[in-house]
Amino acid sequence: MEICDGRCFALEGGGRLDKITVAYETWGTLDASGSNAVLVCHALTGDAHAAGPAGRGQPTAGWWNDLIGPGRAIDTNHYFVICVNVLGGCQGTTGPLSVDPATGEPYADTFPIVSTRDIVRTQAALADRLGIGRWLAVVGGSMGGMSVLEWAVMYPDRVGSLVPIASTAAASALQIGWSEVGRLAIVQDPKWNGGRYYDAEPGMGPHQGLMLARRVAQIHYRSDRSFEDRFGRTTVDRLDDFHLWGRFQVESYLDYHGQKLARRFDANSYLLLNKVMDLHDVGRGRGGTAEALARVKAPSLVISIDSDALYTPRQQLELCDQLREGGASVDYEVIRSDHGHDGFLIEFDQLDPLIGRFLADQYKTI
């Protein structure tokens, strides 16, 4: 859907876009008052296909398929659910792959830097088009949780409740450090070509760099226990005669995830959205995190994953404290998982009752 109406969309970092198309999916039915809408926000390499089967343009089932649907936590018998591909992405919403109206060529490396706040503003414009004045809830994990918090700070009167999972009010030094390593892996690929690779011959884009970035990320998305239990020291190749590239099973696993991402995701979008996460700070320009979160009045369900070494429970506990100090009602829950940060995409048996009960309580109030 077009959301600009011919007007310039000014970005927080000073850039501008004259045309924005937003891709989204919906489930359920919006009630007559528009009060049963739930916004689900996706993570870094996610997209709008949060639920539903694999199909044309969607090689896999929805990434939260076990949480969204009839009788599930985000119950489409009661809620109108929407997930929007973020600004700067590569799954239908305007991003580096899109054609720049000024040149007739893909934006590529000229696509302007965007922020979480810019992403939320595009979602708000879409909500206006759909007749949604206020969300029953905004829900999301990791990068999606960043959007959840920005929604509550930017538009406190439009958010009935919020569920940030394995996320933070501001990116930490550790997260920023890991992000830089991933970006450098891409831009140091000789085939990156300064981001101008869309007309390259097959196999000539920065696939190796993107694969390496994903391998690095996959390591800190999981936990020591997860890797040890699944792989241990199991090998793929015989190691009777030592050689440099004799592989262990965990290496094959990282190769698989690198190849999988390179087949479906654009390197320029990865760079851009990775930077979105680094720039995330709800306190920027608002007098600090505590003052910004004091704007939030909606009830919150904050969820941590106990084995998450990237978005540690410490960050969610700090978030809870600051929300409470600002006067908001906060429930805090911890998911017990061996899967690290990726637990929010895996531990559906634990997430379902927590999110389900919280949303049901909010639904009773409308």
Image (spheres, helix red, strand yellow):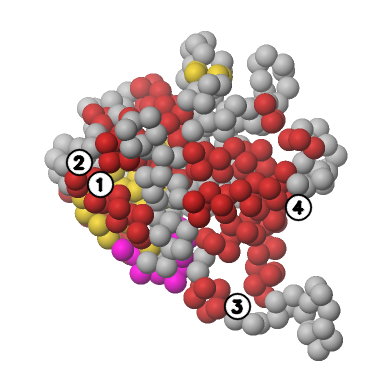
- Residue furthest to the top in view is 6
Q: Amino acid at mark 3?
A: Phe
Q: Position of residue 216 (x, y in %)?
A: 63, 59
Residue 69 in view of the camera: no
Q: Which mark is residue 322?
A: 1
Mark 2 touches mark 1? (CB < 8 Å): yes
- How far apart, in angstroms, are the residues tagged by discs 4 and 1? 42 Å
Report whether 137 appears left or right of 282.
left
- How far apart, in angstroms, are the residues tagged by discs 2 and 4? 46 Å
Q: Nearer the viewer, mark 4 or mark 1?
A: 1
In the depicted structure, whether residue 7 falls above or below residue 363: above
Q: Amino acid at mark 4?
A: Gln
Report whether 290 appears left or right of 12.
left
Q: Specify few, some or many for label 3: CA neighbours under 10 Å numbering under 14, 14-19, or 20 or more.
A: some
Mark 2 touches mark 4? (CB < 8 Å): no
Q: Specify few, some or many for label 1: CA neighbours under 10 Å numbering under 14, 14-19, or 20 or more.
A: many
Judging by the rendered image, the residue that carries numbered circle 2 is: 326
Q: Position of residue 80 (x, y in %)?
A: 32, 38
Q: Which mark is residue 208?
A: 4
Q: Which residues are magenta?
A: 334-345
- How far apart, in angstroms, are the residues tagged by discs 3 and 4? 24 Å
Report whether 162 appears left or right of 229.
left
Task: Name the foreground residue: 94 vs 212.
Answer: 212
